[in-house]
Image: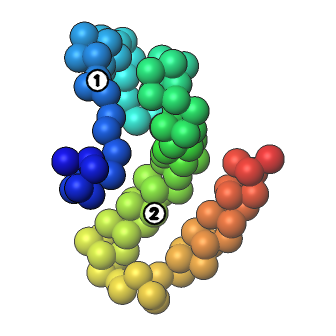
Amino acid sequence: CKSVGFVEAIFPIQDTEAVSLLWRSSSWSVLDAPVDEIRAYFGEEIAFYFAWVGFYSKATLVPGIVGAVLWVSSNYIFQVDIDHNAYAPLYGIGVAVWSRCVAT
């Protein structure tokens, strides 16, 4: 098949025991992935992806919760559109400051 042009590349079958052990490892979540074990099995690029997703999830957790509280309070408590909420500009400034603090 490869000589005819149907197959471009061949990849080895994964070690199912190692993969199942990796996925069942303790404290496996998006916020805290076992990056070293992922790196050992899948390589640097995949481990970097999981490390980045963990960092991004941790960095946006607080602004996301505060934004959700602001949205719920403006829609259901104050009965005001989010565009006319007095706290929305403060939230925007807070997110800008938060992003600067997390980046350093």
Which secondary structure lies at badge 2? helix
Where residue 53 appears, as percent x and y from the top left, is: 49, 44
Q: Which residue is mark 2?
A: 67
The relative height of residue 16 versus residue 31 in the rendered view (above or below) is above
- The one of 79 and 40 positioned closer to us in this rendering: 40
Q: Sequence-wise, which precedes: disc 1 or disc 2?
A: 1
Inspect the image, locate mark 2, and give the three-letter code of the amino acid beneath it: Gly
Q: Is residue 10 above or below residue 41?
A: below
In percent of width and height, residue 36 lies at 54, 19
Color encoding of the figure: rainbow
Q: Residues within 10 Å of mark 2 (few under 14, many from 20)?
A: some
Count of numbered circles on the image: 2
Q: State left or right for residue 17 relative to residue 41.
A: left
Image side of residue 58 versus residue 103, left or right: left
Q: Quadrant of residue 16?
A: top left
Rendered location of residue 32, percent (x, y): 47, 27
What residue appears at the point 58 percent right and 69 percent down from the top-left corner? 91
Q: Residue at x 30, y 70 (%)?
A: 77
Residue depicted at 31% across the width and 38% down the height? 10
The residue closer to the viewer here, 16 or 101, is 16
Left or right of 48 in this view: 81: left
Please indicate, yes or no, whether residue 57 appears anywhere in the rendered image.
yes
Dot 1: few (<14), some (14–19), or many (≥20) neighbours within 10 Å?
few
Provide the residue designation for mark 1: 14
